[in-house]
Image: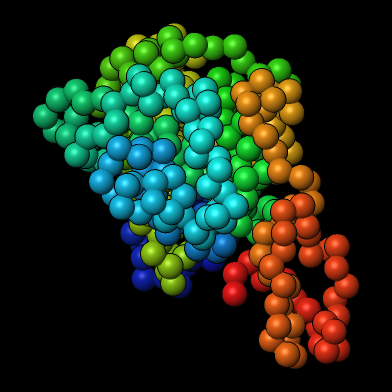
């Protein structure tokens, strides 16, 4: 039986243990490698910082929505991890992100129900909705952006985002989920993958129950470990990504519907991703040139040098970086770099 030693003082500990026992009674030890670490959850790849920068989960690429237009489209409302002005030029190239374009053209944009509600509806009524929708696909970039941000330690600019969107990790996770870190060559693919993904039959009751009960355990543990934060957005994003990766596994293995093995594969891929240095995946310069994407000068840095003593400031010009200047103002005060005044 999995233990939850660190969480034993929590009033919710009994609930978590009950959920785990119910799961193991039916499905055995399939996910013990996850459950056994829920009392020291950081070993799975979670962190306070990851939860903290997961406040929003809006339709980043869906500029057709009223919300998207009101909030500035692609990046106007994700300032926690993306540097607005410096990142905006990437919008010009969003339709050149091949994986995103094919997903957008072939997956249902959105239904009124989230994935767990759709699963419960399937179990209770037998109604078959679409299992993988575009919002589940979007969660892939939700995590890639945040993991990249946490690794580099600054909000993402244009150059960072070219690596996120054109570095190939999105494609590797989709087509080689459990081996994404072992494959060097990017896959060759077309719309047929997403056409099949869209046609996936809904999981049978056993698989739906497996997903629902495993999520109940993990979600409870997240809320207990990070009780000072609102974890609902992060949980939604995580569930969406597990659904997308499960669907990918099913299509890759030529299955008409997701089965338990696909959900397990998705969890293995996801937890490996959380511990991966995503900054290793760089956009190929030739690929960018072929797509007509121009990168700014390597040392270009937007922002200001501000004197701590006299309050004077200098706005960095294109091609300039804070490192190009001395750290002392003419008045003798210390200069510090700031993104905004």
Rendered-image quadrant of the C terminus: bottom right
> In front here: 270 or 108?
108
Picture coordinates of residue 216 (x, y %)?
Answer: 34, 48
Colouring scheme, one of rainbow, by chain, secondary structure, one colour = rainbow
Question: Quick check: can you spot residue 136?
Answer: yes
Q: Residue at x 78, y 46 (%)?
A: 298
Residue 73 x, y percent position in the rendering: 39, 46
| Residue 281 in view of the camera | no
Picture layout, residue 214 above or below residue 290: below
Residue 145 vs residue 251: left or right?
right
Q: As rendered, which of 176 and 291 lies closer to the eye?
A: 291
* In this rendering, position of residue 117 left or right of residue 230: left
Horizontal side, residue 15 vs residue 279: left or right: left
- Where residue 254 appears, as percent x and y from the top left, is 44, 9
Q: Is residue 90 above or below residue 197?
A: below
Q: Quadrant of residue 159?
A: top right
Place of residue 318 in the rendered image (x, y in percent of width and height, measured from the top left):
72, 54
Question: Residue 60, relative to residue 49: is it above or below?
Answer: above
The residue at the far left in this view is 125
Q: Quadrant of residue 134?
A: top left
Residue under the point 44% across and 45% down: 74
Residue in the foreground of this view, choosing between 193 and 242 = 193
Drawn side of residue 317 relative to residue 105, left or right? right
Residue under the point 72% across and 59% down: 317
Relative to 321, residue 256 above or below = above
Residue found at x 53% / y 47%: 88
Number of marks in the rendered image: 0
Q: Nearer the viewer, residue 329 or 160?
A: 329
């Amino acid at each position: 039986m999995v233990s939850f030693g660190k969480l034993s003082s929590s009033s919710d500990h009994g609930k978590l243990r009950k959920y785990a026992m119910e799961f193991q009674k039916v499905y055995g030890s399939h996910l013990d490698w996850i459950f056994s670490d829920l009392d020291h959850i950081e070993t799975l790849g979670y962190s306070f910082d990851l939860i903290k920068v997961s406040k929003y989960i809006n339709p980043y690429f869906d500029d057709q929505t009223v919300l998207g237009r009101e909030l500035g489209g692609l990046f106007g409302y994700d300032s926690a991890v993306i540097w607005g002005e410096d990142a905006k030029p990437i919008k010009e190239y969003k339709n050149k992100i091949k994986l995103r374009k094919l997903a957008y053209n072939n997956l249902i944009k959105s239904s009124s129900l989230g994935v767990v509600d759709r699963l419960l509806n399937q179990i209770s009524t037998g109604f078959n909705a679409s299992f993988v929708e575009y919002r589940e696909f979007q969660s892939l970039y939700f995590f890639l952006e945040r993991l990249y941000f946490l690794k580099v330690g600054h909000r993402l600019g244009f150059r960072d985002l070219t690596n996120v969107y054109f570095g190939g990790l999105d494609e590797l996770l989709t087509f080689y989920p459990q081996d994404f870190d072992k494959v060097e060559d990017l896959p060759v693919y077309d719309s047929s993958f997403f056409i099949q993904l869209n046609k996936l039959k809904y999981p049978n009751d056993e698989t739906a129950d497996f997903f629902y009960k495993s999520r109940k355990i993990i979600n409870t543990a997240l809320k207990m470990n990070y009780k000072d934060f609102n974890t609902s957005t992060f949980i939604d994003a995580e569930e969406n990504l597990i659904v997308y990766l499960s669907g990918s596994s099913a299509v890759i293995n030529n299955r008409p519907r997701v089965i338990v093995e696909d959900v397990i594969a998705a969890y293995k891929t996801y937890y490996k991703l959380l511990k991966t240095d995503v900054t290793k995946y760089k956009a190929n310069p030739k690929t960018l040139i072929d797509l007509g994407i121009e990168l700014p000068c390597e040392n270009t840095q937007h922002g200001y040098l501000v004197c701590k003593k006299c309050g004077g400031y200098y706005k960095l010009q294109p091609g300039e970086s804070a490192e190009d200047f001395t750290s002392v103002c003419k008045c003798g005060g210390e200069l510090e770099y700031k993104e905004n005044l």
